[in-house]
């Protein structure tokens, strides 16, 4: 079982993250790609900036991945979160979950997304037009 947790200031390749989770004993890989949208709270978004000044983001994401592995029979989990100033259309988060069967893969991926949103491991600042 592999946990691949990454906090990066570089663009994220969803295919590369998915490929890190694939194994011979996985029947599926369920993935999620988070993208910066053009509106939030009724306002037009110009950019979103994520920062990890405390250095705790990777630890929080690793904990979330570990919790998902305890709840479901997962083969591998990969989470990549981009920090820095992102523009509309940029990818800010990729989650990939490999499991034997799709039901636990989808459930685990949903759990990880929800936990990320609930426990946002980085500071988020939106700027508007």
Image (cartoon, rainbow, N blue to C red):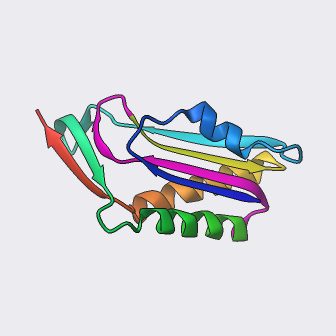
Q: Main secondary structure of the magenta part?
A: strand
Say above or below: 106 vs 3: above
What is the tally of numbered marks visible in this picture? 0
Q: Tell me the quarter of the picture where residue 75 sits.
A: bottom right
Q: Tell me the quarter of the picture where residue 14 sits.
A: top right
Q: Position of residue 108 (x, y in %)?
A: 65, 56
Q: Position of residue 29 (x, y in %)?
A: 72, 42
Which residue is most to the left? 129
Q: Tell me the quarter of the picture where residue 48 sits.
A: top left
Q: Position of residue 24 (x, y in %)?
A: 88, 43
Nearest to the observer: residue 91 or residue 10: 10
Q: Position of residue 37 (x, y in %)?
A: 32, 34
At horizontal 58% and vertical 59% (from top left) the residue drawn is 111
On the picture, is 98 further left or further right than 35? right
Nearest to the observer: residue 2 or residue 44: 2
At horizontal 24% and vertical 35% (from top left) the residue drawn is 39
Nearest to the observer: residue 123 or residue 28: 123
On the picture, is 18 further left or further right than 49? right
Residue 2 colored in magenta in the image: no
Numbered range of the magenta stretch: 71-90
Which residue is most to the top? 89
Say above or below: 55 vs 109: below
Say above or below: 79 vs 36: below
At horizontal 25% and vertical 46% (from top left) the residue drawn is 49
At horizontal 84% and vertical 43% (from top left) the residue drawn is 27
Q: Quadrant of the C terminus?
A: top left
Q: Quadrant of the N terminus?
A: bottom right
């Amino acid at each position: 079982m592999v946990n691949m947790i990454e906090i990066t200031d570089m663009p994220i390749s969803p295919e590369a993250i998915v490929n890190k989770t694939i194994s011979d004993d996985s029947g599926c890989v369920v993935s999620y790609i988070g993208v910066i949208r053009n509106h939030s709270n009724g306002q037009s978004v110009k950019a979103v900036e994520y920062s990890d000044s405390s250095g705790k983001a990777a630890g929080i994401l690793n904990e979330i991945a570990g919790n998902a592995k305890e709840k479901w029979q997962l083969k591998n989990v990969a989470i990549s979160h981009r920090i820095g100033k992102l523009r509309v259309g940029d990818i800010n988060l990729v989650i990939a979950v490999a499991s034997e069967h799709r039901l636990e893969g989808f459930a685990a991926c949903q759990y990880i997304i929800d936990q990320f949103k609930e426990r946002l491991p980085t500071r988020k600042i939106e700027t508007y037009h």
